[in-house]
């Protein structure tokens, strides 16, 4: 049973293919209960993660972003996570000035065998995001009336109003 | 800034070996300086230096990489030259650096708030700590410190850090060492929600003219900027708060560990968006984590191009 059934927030997770994605799989295969708010994006290595990915997720309204890679010294590509660690740490220290609570972003290391740790990370992070609530939005979502109009225009084959 | 005659003599001396020397000249009125490209000895006469010479001329260097160029730099500008050298974006053999010492440059927005209109200024003179602005038969006397650019407030590099020829006598600003910019601590008094609302408002004013990018000495990608690419499509052409915000985030992220805080982005911004706030915060992180400052030594290794297995200032968070 999902913990926040019906009240999920959107949390984006960037997981490296070799460790954390495997760790999440281990947790799944072992049928560990975890919150279902996290949407996982698999990347080849935590070194592949451009800090802009994370900012883009926040721009799109993500309530939280979690990055997870191989433990230091365990990177499949030997040193990708060392570079990632530097970038992500700077991003975390930069976030306060934008007004995005740095608690909404976290990076950690989970290996492929650490199913219980993965469960713990997901649950802890999800709980933390739920305490913070939904993210502040840069653009207001469409109102119901606008959605109806949107629907009408799409059905009329005109595309949405902003692109006519 | 002192030593105009000395500087002119030096330019006359080196000009024969160069394609051009970049400096400043008086613009269309008494208030604006504009970049001057000196190609002939006659051009040298138009050269000016002083508190109106706001432009960071290092911005032109990557575009003139294959030419022999002389460039006149203030302390802050020289850091941009160092950073460009460090990243091998310019070739030291092709650049002759004329270093100045600087007492601060004027922020036209601040001046405009003081004197009302900037429309018809005939002359601006600095006499010690006083600024004398002449508009027709009116005279305004203003304290120079009140209209200096923000970056000058905590400047610790008034003298060019790299130069082939140094003009004037170096001054020091030791009193500012270690001082963080006031704007950052003021901003930290706000809550996260207030900060977010602040940027939302500022980004709603952004017209995405790309002046911040074009004035930035470190933005060397020009036509290959990721903000313009369709694949990956980081930004659409839509002009809304979210897209403007993302554009500024791209700019900050691509300046991580490279920004020398020359303040050109903020100066060039026609909407006066306080972009330096973002850069100061990022640079604070770079300073705290890596004890590194960009544009100080061309031999330094940029912090994001290297790593340590055990980082000194990054603690692994326990879960």
Image: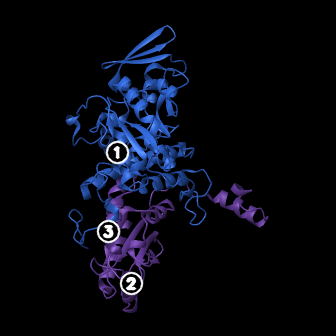
Chain colours: A purple, B blue
* Precedes in sequence: disc 3 or disc 2: 2
Quadrant the C terminus of chain A occupies:
bottom right
Lateral position of residue B70 relative to residue B157, left or right:
right
Q: In the image as oriented, which residue stretches furthest toward the bottom?
A: A30
SS for tag 2?
Answer: loop
Q: Where is residue A132 in the image (x, y as percent from the top left)?
A: 37, 62
* Residue extending furthest toward the right: A156
In this view, the residue in front, B64 or B108, is: B64
Q: Which chain carries label 1?
A: B
Q: Please state which of residues A56 and B52 is positioned toward the viewer in this rendering.
A: B52
Q: Can you say whether A37 is above or below A51 in the image?
A: below
Above-or-below relation of B101 to A65: above
Which residue is under mark 2? A18
**How far apart in space, not on screen, are marks 1 and 2 (Cα)?**
41 Å
Relative placement, left or right, of A22 versus B289 is right
Q: Residues within 10 Å of mark 1 (few under 14, many from 20)?
A: many
Residue B145 coordinates in the image, percent (x, y): 32, 25
Rendering coords of residue B194 (x, y %): 40, 47
Mark yes or no: residue B258 visible. Answer: no
Q: How crowded is mark 2: few (under 14 residues within 10 Å), some or many (20 or more)?
A: many
B172 up-or-down from B26: above or below: below
**Where residue B57 appears, x then y in whole percent?**
45, 39
* Callout 3: SS: helix
Question: For this rendering, which residue is in front, A109 or A87?
Answer: A87
Q: Name the residue under label 3.
A: A85
Q: Mark 2 lies on which chain?
A: A
**Quarter of the image containing the N terminus of chain A?**
bottom left
Mark nearest the camera among 3 and 1 is 1
Residue B180 found in image quarter: top left
Residue B79 — which label? 1
Chain of the residue displaying label 3: A
Is residue B208 among the parts visible in the rendering? yes
């Amino acid at each position: 049973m999902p913990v926040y059934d019906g009240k999920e927030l959107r949390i984006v997770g960037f997981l490296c293919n070799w460790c954390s994605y495997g760790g999440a799989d281990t947790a799944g295969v072992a049928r560990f209960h975890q919150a279902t708010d996290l949407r996982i994006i698999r990347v080849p290595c935590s070194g592949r993660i451009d800090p802009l990915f994370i900012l883009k997720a926040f721009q799109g309204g993500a309530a939280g972003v979690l990055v997870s890679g191989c433990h230091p010294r365990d990177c499949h590509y030997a040193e990708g996570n060392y570079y990632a660690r530097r970038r992500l740490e700077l991003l975390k220290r930069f976030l306060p000035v934008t007004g995005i609570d740095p608690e909404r972003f976290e990076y950690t290391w989970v290996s492929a065998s650490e199913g219980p740790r993965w469960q713990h990370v997901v649950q802890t992070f999800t709980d933390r995001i739920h305490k913070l609530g939904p993210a502040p939005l840069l653009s207001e979502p469409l109102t119901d009336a606008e959605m109806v109009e949107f629907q009408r225009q799409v059905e009329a084959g005109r595309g949405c109003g902003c692109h006519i | 800034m002192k030593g105009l005659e000395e500087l002119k003599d030096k330019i006359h001396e080196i000009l024969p070996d160069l394609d051009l020397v970049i400096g400043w000249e008086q613009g269309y009125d008494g208030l604006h300086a504009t970049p001057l490209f000196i190609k002939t000895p006659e051009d040298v006469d138009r050269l000016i230096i002083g508190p109106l010479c706001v432009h960071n001329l290092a911005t032109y260097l990557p575009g003139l990489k294959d030419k022999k160029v002389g460039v006149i730099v203030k302390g802050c500008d020289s850091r941009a030259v160092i950073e460009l050298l460090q990243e091998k974006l310019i070739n030291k053999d092709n650049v002759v650096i004329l270093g100045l010492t600087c007492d601060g440059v004027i922020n036209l927005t601040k001046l405009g708030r003081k004197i009302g209109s900037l429309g018809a200024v005939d002359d601006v003179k600095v006499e010690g700590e006083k600024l004398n602005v002449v508009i027709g038969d009116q005279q305004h006397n203003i304290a120079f410190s009140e209209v200096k650019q923000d970056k000058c407030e905590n400047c610790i590099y008034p003298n060019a850090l790299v130069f082939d020829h140094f003009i004037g006598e170096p001054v020091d600003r030791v009193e500012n060492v270690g001082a963080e910019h006031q704007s950052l601590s003021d901003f930290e008094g706000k809550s996260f929600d207030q900060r977010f609302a602040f940027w939302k408002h500022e980004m709603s004013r952004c017209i995405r003219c790309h002046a911040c990018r074009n004035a930035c000495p470190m933005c060397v990608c020009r036509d290959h900027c990721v903000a313009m690419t369709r694949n990956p499509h980081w930004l659409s052409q839509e002009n809304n708060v979210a897209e403007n915000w993302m554009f500024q985030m791209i700019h900050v992220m691509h300046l991580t560990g490279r920004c020398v805080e020359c303040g050109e982005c903020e100066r060039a911004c026609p909407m006066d968006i306080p972009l330096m706030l973002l850069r100061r915060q990022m640079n604070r992180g770079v300073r705290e984590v890596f004890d590194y400052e960009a544009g100080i030594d061309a031999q330094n290794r940029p912090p994001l191009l290297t790593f340590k297995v055990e980082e000194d200032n990054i603690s692994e968070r326990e879960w």
